[in-house]
Amino acid sequence: MTRAHRSLHRIIWPILVLLIVLGVALALWRRPPPEHAGAVAPALSQERVA
Amino acid sequence: MSVGLRAVQWNRDKVIYDAILVGGVVLYIGGYLAIAWHTDPPRTQPDAIDLWIRASGSCAFLMLTIILSIGPLARLDGRFLKLLYNRRHFGVLTFLVACFHFACLLDWYISLQALPNLAAELTKWGDYTKFIGFPFKALGLAALLILFLLAATSHDFWLMFLTPRVWKFLHMLLYAGYGLVVMHVALGHMQGDRSPLVPIMLFASFGIVAGLHLVAGWRERRTDRAAEGNGWLAVGALASIPDKGARIVAAPAGERIAVFRDGNQIGAVTNLCAHQNGPLGEGRIIDGCITCPWHGYQYRLADGCAPPPFTEKLVTYRVRLERGIIEVDPTPLAPGTPAAIVVV
């Protein structure tokens, strides 16, 4: 790898780690509660079929 | 090395590598379906298709995780170089599995006679401003497009056409593709599945890949520190360069230089292989030629030229022995210029 590739690597990965960890953590934290998810699922499938 | 265009340059090692890959994919998807069918048999056709979607999707995700781990693993431990050798076939197969995942999704909508709903989901522009409720399938599609671009340009023709430097930058798009896939799962499957398995799998997979890249990048910082000196750079005593091996030095504001020793012959070439910019200095001298650890491209130590009938040439550097210390002039010579010396 060239020096430029290695430099880009060193910039990209910390940014990617920050974005993905925040994104997944937020998606986990804000995920709808089970009873709500259960209520939403049939509605979604009906909507899809309609 | 190639002297003509061939669709795929098969050899025994590649056939074995590919057979293991295909076998692994069949085993994974077959095993997933068998276990899922046994524990919770699907009641309807869409349910059955849904299992195929999950099996192929998780397979593609696992394959991406492995592919992205191979590069840093090979930099940290040479034993993983064997996996790197045919990584492009691994990537193309991952694209095919991802395509199959997408085809299963289309089949699911068709089985419900609801294909227009997919288009409606993807074009519901208001949803793109939400976090939970974001059209996660669009993230998957974007990742699939990246995989397509990389698979389509994976052949050596594109490597030569684009130049290794541009090709490598282009293929670094895979990192973004992986990020898109992680968020595709986090905002899609993970929202409906309360099992802790999905977040654990996401964090563990991404953690392994990111950790390996960060550690490998951190370790390489040392090698990138330019050697001190005005003009000629000190490499070390003759005995400090392993026979049939190399020591790598960094030129000020330049690329790495690989200084090789073959008995009492010393020569310096760029550390970048002409094929895919592989780290030549981590390779060995085999049959009198510097051999790239990635794909086995070979160059003569004396002048950096590939042996006939091949035509690749490397940038070379002047070397000298001063008071028992090997030194290298960081000014690059034209590719293929003889510059090696014999130390008596």
Image: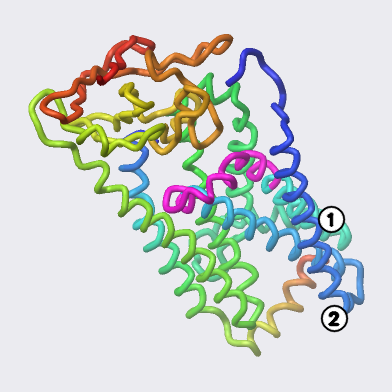
| Residue B88 counted in the magenta span | yes
Q: Determine the secondary structure under disc 2.
A: loop
Residue B138 visible in the snapshot: no
Question: What residue is shown with label 1?
Answer: B107
Which quadrant is the N terminus of chain B positioned in?
top right
Q: Determine the secondary structure under disc 1.
A: helix
- Expressed as whole percent of the image width and height from the top left, the position of residue B64 reads 60, 54
**Residue at left 32%, top 24%?**
B264
Mark number displayed over residue B40: 2
Q: Nearer the viewer, residue B194 or B162?
A: B162
- Provide the chain ID for the residue under circle 1: B
Q: Is residue B112 left or right of residue B313?
A: right
Callout 1 touching callout 2 (CB < 8 Å): no
- Amino acid type shown at disc 1: Asp
| Magenta-drawn segment | B72-93
Residue B108 position by quadrant: bottom right
- Expressed as whole percent of the image width and height from the top left, the position of residue B314 reads 39, 18
